[in-house]
Image (cartoon, grey):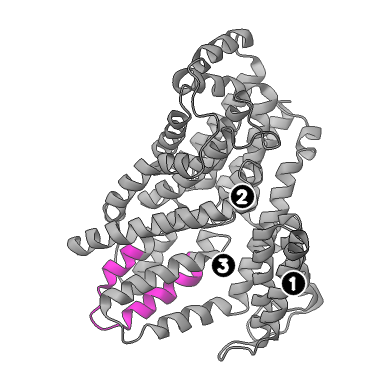
Amino acid sequence: MSLNFKALAPLIVGAVLWALPVPAGLAPNAWAYFAIFAAVVVALILEPIAPALAGLAGVTLAALFKLVPMAAGKDPSAADAIKWALSGFSDGTVWLIFGAFMFALGYEKTGLGKRLALSLIKVMGKKALGLGYAVALADLILAPFMPSNTARSGGTIFPVIKNIPPLYGSTPEDNPRGLGGYLMWTALATTCVTSSMFLTSLAPNILAQSLVEKTTKVVLNWNDWFMGFLPVGIVLFAITPLLAYILYPPTKKSSDDAPIWAGNELKKLGSITSREILMAVLALGALLSWIFLKDQVQATTVALAAICLMVVFKVVSWDDVIGYKQAWNVLAWFATLVTLADGLNKVGFLAWFAKSISGSMVGLSPTATMVGLVLVFFLSHYMFASVTAHVAAMLPVMLAAAMNVPGLDIRLVSILLCGTLGIMGVITPYGTGPSPIYYGSGYVKGKDFWILGLVFGIVYLGAFLLIGFPWNLARA
């Protein structure tokens, strides 16, 4: 019965929405497209079929009915429809996510990942909570220097920590809650916090800074950003590993013998091999390029170059690359989600949604308006598979709405809206670049991911409003 419900629910949601009258101000194709998008989201939550297949089915239906125009006021042709449907596969973030999995493959095949994991366990392996804080601290150290949290968390941290759970007998197939689920969720939740802490810790932050200046003439510098989120960041960073430990506890909480065992295993591994050194050089080269050459070479280009060198120098084989089903599956899944989210913007649904929401706030007090704008901006991220797309589509509309409210402090509104960009990524398996990587690892199952996203989203947003709002109000 439950399987039938799971299979029917997305179809029912999509059909009911499609059959409802089209809301005023929205084109029929936009409403039909939203019905398909909503059906796909329900399918992603319930998982009656593989998530990648749900995304592919969604873009295929939209292409079949030619719902997405390539240009305003112009009906799409069959060629336009398929071009749009496949557009997600040209997205740089999609391939950077794929690159993160290839890095993990290199760590695994060379044994470097196991060596690094054992070294970490030797130092901090007595307690699972200690490992959680070690992962969080690693992200915090890198965050101010790496605007791509996909490169930072997905390409640098994930390939290392992926090797830790199996050493405790925890794999995606066998005992994922042993340790793997906790570590993967902690890594994702932490990078969402650090992505909000610094102007330079998330690429869309810099885009948001530019849009704020162009729209409102308010200039937000690095220090403005840092100080605006500081008390929230301190609290959330301090509690995130502990909160994950409480809400999604590992069954393997401690092992006094783990450091001793890890030390003995390191001795058995012997001296570091030439393939491990080569993998380390390539990984370090990519990391330094992501930090120091971010203005000269795009992060995805660096990842693709590293993958090519990994194969050329036989760190991994081409058969290893094409046989890594997990990476290709996530590539297909996220590419279709990026396309689906882009479609919401192209059909005009997002602009209509933002204007409708901002219009409903007319007559509210300045404080209620600011809280309302933050809530809408944060929760609307369920409709986006990219923080960059969210910023580009929604931030100017939210700022324009705020500027039309008498007595509203636009600088304060700008700081509040921008401060949510990192933490909103925690709410879905596609909310920010590293999300598909940790979801694709298989340690946190679909339903658990959505529930944790909801709970942590409420905690993060609640902390932001209860701590960040009065803090910034006092500083205004």
The residue wearing badge 2 is 436
Does the CB distance between marks 3 and 1 fall below 8 Å? Answer: no
Q: Nearer the viewer, residue 166 or 473?
A: 166
Does the CB distance between marks 3 and 2 fall below 8 Å? Answer: no
Q: Amino acid at mark 1?
A: Leu
The residue wearing badge 1 is 11
Residue at image location 31% in from the left, 45% down from the top: 234
Helix, strand or loop at disc 1? helix
User: Which of labels 2 and 1 is toward the front?
Assistant: 1
- Answer with mark 3 or mark 1, whichever residue precedes in sequence: 1
- Answer with mark 2 or mark 1, whichever residue precedes in sequence: 1
The label shown at residue 383 is: 3
Q: Position of residue 223 (x, y in %)?
A: 27, 51
Within 10 Å of the Cα at label 2, are there few (<14), some (14-19), or many (20+) other Cα atoms?
Answer: many
Q: Position of residue 304 (x, y in %)?
A: 65, 42
The label shown at residue 191 is: none
Residue 217 falls left or right of residue 151: left
Alpha carbon separation for disc pair 2 and 1: 24 Å
Inspect the magenta stretch and tell me whether residue 62 lies in it.
Answer: no
Number of marks present in the image shown:
3
Q: Amino acid at mark 2?
A: Pro
Helix, strand or loop at disc 3? helix
Q: Amino acid at mark 3?
A: Met
Residue 60: quadrant of the picture: bottom right
Does the CB distance between marks 2 and 1 fall below 8 Å? Answer: no
Which segment did they paint magenta? 391-416
User: Which of labels 3 and 1 is toward the front?
Assistant: 1
- Can residue 365 be seen here? The reply is yes
Residue 77 falls left or right of residue 442: right
Inspect the magenta stretch and tell me whether residue 415 lies in it.
Answer: yes
